[in-house]
Amino acid sequence: MALCDRVVLIGDPDHVTSALYQRTLRASFDVIVAADEETALQILQSSKIDVFVLELTLIREHDWERLSYVGQLCAARGTQLVICSTLDERRRGFEIGAVAYLIKPTLPSQLMHTIQSVFDTNLPGAQ
């Protein structure tokens, strides 16, 4: 059970990876998992999500036009985009609005630390 009201959406087609991340993150956050692009976009559009952890391969053929749309949607909804992917596309990831980019394999503790850092950085008055 989460200790705060922050919501993290994990968008990853790999069920084992998303379950591993979910187990760790749910100690501090409410966690939602989406295993496909359509579900992830529906959740982003209809729910208050604080951080979207995105595996680029969730988006069909990791199409950068569609990924750019995801970045724009996150920005419009006030959702921080954290990319955690097997693909090393850091430059492009930051161009679409990612606030952090992790290359897998990523330990759940590293993902937790990154998300906590995102929250700390985005607190009112934080630098």
Image (cartoon, grey):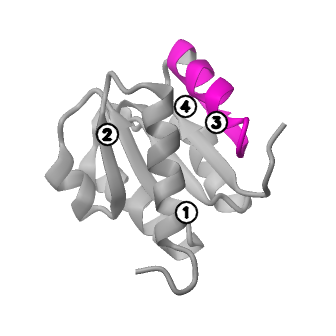
Quadrant in which residue 65 is drawn: bottom left
Q: Which mark is residue 119?
A: 1
Q: Which residue is label 4 attached to?
A: 36
**Among the two numbered marks 1 and 3 on one chain, the one whose residue lies closer to the N terminus:** 3
Q: Which residues are magenta?
A: 16-35
The residue mark sitting in front, 4 or 2, is 2
Q: Secondary structure at mark 1?
A: helix
**Among the two numbered marks 1 and 4 on one chain, the one whose residue lies closer to the N terminus:** 4
Q: Amino acid at mark 2?
A: Leu
**Among the two numbered marks 2 and 1 on one chain, the one whose residue lies closer to the N terminus:** 2
Neighbor class of circle 2 (other Cα within 10 Å; few <14, some 14-19, many 20+) is many
**Among the two numbered marks 2 and 3 on one chain, the one whose residue lies closer to the N terminus:** 3
Q: Amino acid at mark 4?
A: Asp
Q: Contact (CB < 8 A) between labels 2 and 1? A: no
What residue do we see at 63% from left, 48% from top? 8
- Is residue 123 toward the left or the right of residue 101 in the image? right
Q: CA distance from mark 3 to mark 4?
A: 20 Å
Q: Contact (CB < 8 A) between labels 1 and 4? A: no
Q: CA distance from mark 2 to mark 3?
A: 16 Å
Whole-percent x, y for residue 78 in the image: 56, 72
Whole-percent x, y for residue 90 in the image: 19, 48
Q: CA distance from mark 1 to mark 4?
A: 25 Å
Q: Secondary structure at mark 4?
A: loop
Q: Secondary structure at mark 3?
A: helix
Q: CA distance from mark 4 to mark 2?
A: 20 Å
Q: Which residue is label 3 attached to?
A: 25
Q: Which residue is label 2 attached to?
A: 102
- Is residue 90 toward the left or the right of residue 18 in the image? left
Whole-percent x, y for residue 91 in the image: 15, 54
